[in-house]
Image (tube, grey):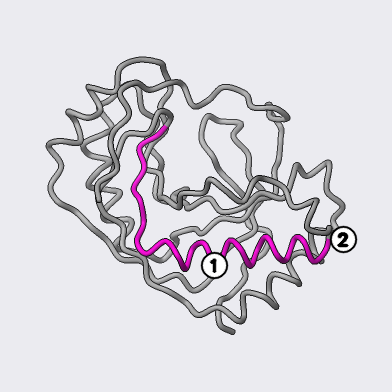
Amino acid sequence: MAVPHATDVRNHWYWRPGWGIGSRFYTWHITFDGQPEVEELADQYRSLLSSQPSLDVIPNQWLHLTMQGIGFVQDVAIDDVDAIVAAAKNRCARLAPFKLTIGTPHIDPESIQIAVDPVEPVRQLRAAIRAAIADVWGQDRVPEPAEPYNPHLSLAYTNTDGPAAPLIEALSSAPNLSAHAMINSCQLIVLNRDEGMYVWEPYATIDLGS
């Protein structure tokens, strides 16, 4: 079922608590390097969206599916990070790789997103990551609520407040596009947003089913 568009958008790039220039954050993402169908899909939407001044369109190298944060680098002991990675390797080895279908985008209040299908394997992967954090810190110290969680691929972030109508109109001219991605791993990354885009350095890659 299609996700309804927001009626208004707001600037995504306000500084959330703890964030500022120079902030670095440990978080788990699914990234899409080596997924040509996803990059082709993003390229086609990029040609439609790049003329919209209210959008910062995500380059292919920074396409991602957000899963689970750990914390700011200065707040997390490196031994704890490595212990969480080791626990995640053990838990994720029990999960099978899976295929995602990426289809029709919708306007969220702060971004343009595409829901993925099926969602259950992503949820299982996130649950394994959260369990790995709990293995190290205990269940009561796992950051971020378990719900609500809606797996999605982001195409662009909004950089201003205003009506969503121009973005809805831009998307209305898009052909019916879809892409498939085979998910064999997830990544712990060190995220920053110093330049008005989420970019990262990889910290660890965890294989599924190994």
The total number of labels drawn is: 2
Q: Position of residue 105 (x, y in %)?
A: 28, 44
Q: Quadrant of residue 15?
A: top right
Residue 86 within the magenta-colored segment of the rendering: no
Q: Secondary structure at mark 2?
A: helix
Residue 114 within the magenta-colored segment of the rendering: yes
What is the number of the mark on residue 133?
A: none
- Residue linked to disc 1: 124
Q: Quadrant of residue 71?
A: top right
In this view, the residue in front, 132 or 71, is 132
Circle 1 or circle 2, nearest the eye: 1
Q: Quadrant of the C terminus?
A: bottom right
Q: Position of residue 6 (x, y in %)?
A: 32, 29
- Residue linked to disc 2: 79
Q: Which residues are magenta?
A: 111-136
Q: Main secondary structure of the magenta part?
A: helix
The residue at the point 62 percent across, 67 percent down is 205
